[in-house]
Amino acid sequence: MAEPPAGSPPLIDGEPGAIAPTEASDDVLRVEHIAKKFGPVTALRDVNLHLRKGEVLGLLGDNGAGKSTLIKIICGFQKQDSGEMFLHGQPYAPKSVDDARAHGIGTVYQDLALIDELSVYHNLFLRRERVHRPLPLLANGQMKREARAALDEIGINIPRIDVAVARLSGGQRQAIAVARTVNSDADIILLDEPLAAMGAKEGAQILDLVARLKEEGRVSMIMILHNYVHVLQACDRVSMIQDGVIALDKPTAETSVEELTDIVVNEYRRAREAAHAAPASAAE
Amino acid sequence: MASATHGPASTGPSAGSEGPAHERRALPTWRQVGERLISLREGSIIVITLIVVIYFSVNTSAFLTSANFETLLPYFAPFAILAAGEVFVMILGEIDLSIGAMYLFGPVLFYKLNTSFGLPLVPAVIVMLLACTVVGAINGFNVAVVGISSLVATLGMLFTFEGIALIISQGTPVATPGGQPPLGTFGKVFGGGTYSELIWALGIIVVLQIVLSFTRWGLYTVAVGSNKLGASEAGVRVNLIYIRNFMLCSMLAGLTGLFEAVRAATIQPDPAGPNELQLLAIAAAVIGGTAMSGGAGTVVGALIGALFLGVLKDGLVIQGVNANYLLFYTGLAVIIAMTANVYVGRVRRGHSASG
């Protein structure tokens, strides 16, 4: 693992707080100079990110930093205002979620994107339904069998797969959302807060699943997490978004909970001082 | 969530509470039987419709006769078709208030195409249905893409196209082409034959229930209605589903209008009838278990809801009851059905109020 030497990274001109982008020869995904505005609100100013093969990248940042926006751009749900992406070295501009999925990028959304009224197996196969060709009728039996097999393989225990997902617990729902993406033959998986609203035991199961996938080495993952202990436990490397740019990019082995916390707290203090200073200077 | 699972699926009780648990397993309580029946979405309305049928059969000798069955048909077949289309929109959590306009506009356009433009009967029907479908597409576009509330968008369409129907027809009733005696094949097939509308209604119900339950279109309809954002995140093209379902709804309304115009042999350009008809069709869908809360509904339920309203109307007419009671009972049925729906939803979700 030849990482670029980590030191105090130089500033990019024009984008305060941003560090120089890193890259590696085995990158599967590269994100370059991505910017995105929602009306007057700037979510991302200039984001550079890369993901190496088989790597688990932790994407950090405070609430509203633009993490979910970045994930939604990569997975084809939203389009960036400017900037480019490269998948396996080729330019990558997904037209839709389906298009991104066809490129092997699967996503577990923060809100899980599960359909409460539909059964477990229909949720697992949503947008990838099996049908009785040439008839357009759903092959429910086949989907049930494949769903059961897929859940067993991943090691998720759902007693009944023909009940509506509304009846499942938060952890089970999360597990199904993850299983759906893993089962979709994605080789890049984006997980937006996979541990949100989960108990300790359920969270551990998801982290175990991530670890198993990593061991298999088939998939690369970008994972948004809030708990820095989980980050250090599950991720190979962390990238932190702050104020719309990447403010930190380090292997987890070279950082600590303290450092990550300090960056966020310092940013908060700086922003607060700026906010205090602004009205004062306006009064003068 | 923990307190939400005292159903049979909950994990085995500890040794201390074995007694009551065994009793429950051996003898399901009436409550459980009842819950199971009404968790079938159409369950409660099937039972109620049967009760109403039995009540009228016992109380009026004229009810259970073949002659009365023929009287009953036009009371429910058109509602069933209109309601079936409305179900596809209501599962999305939306409503189409323009089906009355399509019901009125369809036959008027059909007449114009046939008499003024010289189109033969069947091509005139096809062009008319296409026109109604386009109106539906505009409804779907306005709701899904432009973002107008479906109630407002389709209300605007209701007045617009009832207006267009009045302008084209100059408000004058005309004889329906192909609907004059002696009826030819066209007239018999498109609403004139005694069982024509019934056969169409049953055929449409069967096909649409299959579409809803066993095809991607149906699955995505439920998905969009249940969780619009989630469905789009999963890659479902929400706008397409919206537009498609509104198209279906409008087309079926135009077709129903044609059936009724052929059956009555005249095209009556008066919006009052269609306006009432469309509200009753929506009532039929609601009574049949389709909640506008989204994600839930059945086409078969719409048929049974329409049958219920038909039986009620027919029975009350035979009994010679003051016709004012009809609206009163229909209103009660809608409210009771909706209340039952909310309850059924909770039962299906395992007593939990939220997901």
Image (cartoon, rainbow, N blue to C red):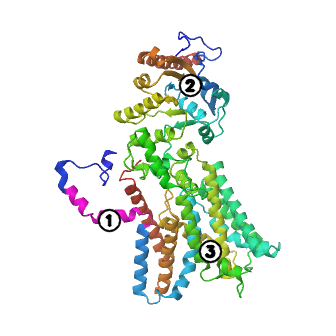
- Report the disc number at residue B33: 1
- Say if labels 3 and 2 share a chain: no
**Image quadrant occupied by the C terminus of chain A:** top right
Disc 3 versus disc 1: distance between alpha carbons? Answer: 42 Å
- Please tell me whether residue B32 is drawn above or below residue B260 in the rendered image: above
Q: Which mark is residue B125?
A: none
Can I make out residue B324 in this image?
Answer: no
10 Å crowding of disc 3: few (<14), some (14-19), many (20+): few
Q: What is the CA distance from the residue labelled 3 to the residue labelled 2? A: 65 Å
Q: Is residue B265 left or right of residue B57?
A: right
Circles 3 and 2: CB atoms closer than 8 Å:
no
Can the viewer see residue A62 in this picture?
yes
Which residues are the magenta region?
B20-42
Q: Position of residue B172 (x, y in %)?
A: 74, 77
User: What residue is disc 2 on?
Assistant: A51
Q: Is residue A50 above or below residue A164?
A: above
- Asked whether the residues under marks 2 and 1 belong to the same chain, the reply is no
Judge left or right: residue A62 versus residue B344: right
Residue at the far bottom: name it.
B61
